[in-house]
Amino acid sequence: MRVSMQQSYHSMTNQFNTLSNSLQKTVTQMATGKRLLLPSDDPIAATRISQLNRDQAAIDQYQSNIDAASSSMNQQESVLDSVNNTLLSIRDDLLAVQNDTIDASGMNSYGSVIESATESIVAALNYQDADGHYIFGGTVNDQPPIVYEDTDGDGEGDEYVYQGNDNHRETTVSNGVTIDTNVSVGEMFGDDLSILNTLDDLSKSLQNPDLDPMDPQISDNIQQAIDTLDRATEGLNTATASLGERQNTISMLSDAQTGVSNANADLIGQLQDLDYGPATIEFTGLQMAMEATMKTYAKVSNLSLFNVVD
């Protein structure tokens, strides 16, 4: 069967367009460094890359949650360390009052110091984060966990009251893994805030102008305060240790997820990134093929019935 001139033009035009599209694809691949420009270029690889990208997005969210949780727990540890130091200072003062011969004026002075220290503890435990949330009230974060209320109706505050709860806030730090991100005043000092109220009562009694330094009840009250303070310190240290353990846990999870993320990134690169060696060879081959096609097309275009030699 004889091939017409029109069929030859049509065939060469199709070949030229095919080569041009292939060359343009190769140029785009080399410019972007990506082997896959469309899912149809390699459907299996494209599906795997899509799955890996979803995994990466999940890991990014977990890592963001870990960063936020770690920052919050660092803040809590810092505040609790300050509270612990204040409690130890109060204990030293109580031992001084108990063991030294102090007159009424000296006891009044110690009472004032204990009152001020107690108020500083309350201020620390009513700490708010950058978003204005109270961090030591359990899951109640929109009001101060500790308030000084008038419980006897005389118009003046006389007792510290806890407004929070003992529940924990949680955040997801890995697939199917959640972690508690806070400790509460209630779990450290009890919902009755016995340590704060004991210190408050003692500071008032020491500042009483009618105080008799030789009254044995004073010594009993001081010893009771020391015992209560020791229990409170133990509760505080337990809470601080739990924060440290959680920090260690999320740090290990973060390191593990960073390793997975890096491995995923490497695999995505293997599936998606262009190997420039073969691509350069293909680019050169396509250029040569296009040049040959264009020369052939030019020759065919110059043919006619009058210059065909049998």
Image: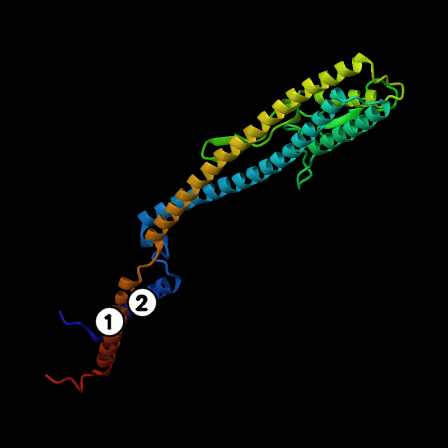
According to the image, label 2 marks what residue? 23
Q: Nearer the viewer, residue 7 or 120?
A: 120
In the rendered image, the residue lying farthest to the bottom is 306
Residue 80 sits in quarter? top right
Q: Quadrant of the N terminus?
A: bottom left
- As helix, strand or loop, the secondary structure at mark 2 comes to helix
**Residue 308 sits above or below residue 140 on the image:** below
Q: Amino acid at mark 1?
A: Ala
Find out whether the residues at labels 1 and 2 contact each other: C-beta distance under 8 Å.
no
Quarter of the image that includes the C terminus: bottom left
Residue at 31 percent across and 68 percent down: it is 20
**Residue identifier under label 1:** 289
Label placed on residue 240: none
Say which residue appears at 56% left-offset and 37% top-offset.
69
Instruction: Name the residue at 52% across, 39% down.
Output: 66
Residue 3 seen in the current view:
yes
The amino acid on which the numbered mark 2 sits, given as a three-letter code, is Leu
The location of residue 109, given as percent across then percent down, is: 82, 28
Q: Is residue 258 above or below residue 11?
A: above
Q: Nearer the viewer, residue 27 or 270?
A: 270
Spatial distance from mark 1 to mark 2, Cα to Cα? 10 Å
Q: Secondary structure at mark 1?
A: helix
Q: Residue at x 31, y 63 (%)?
A: 276
Nearest to N terminus: mark 1 or mark 2: 2
248 relative to 190 in the view: left or right: left
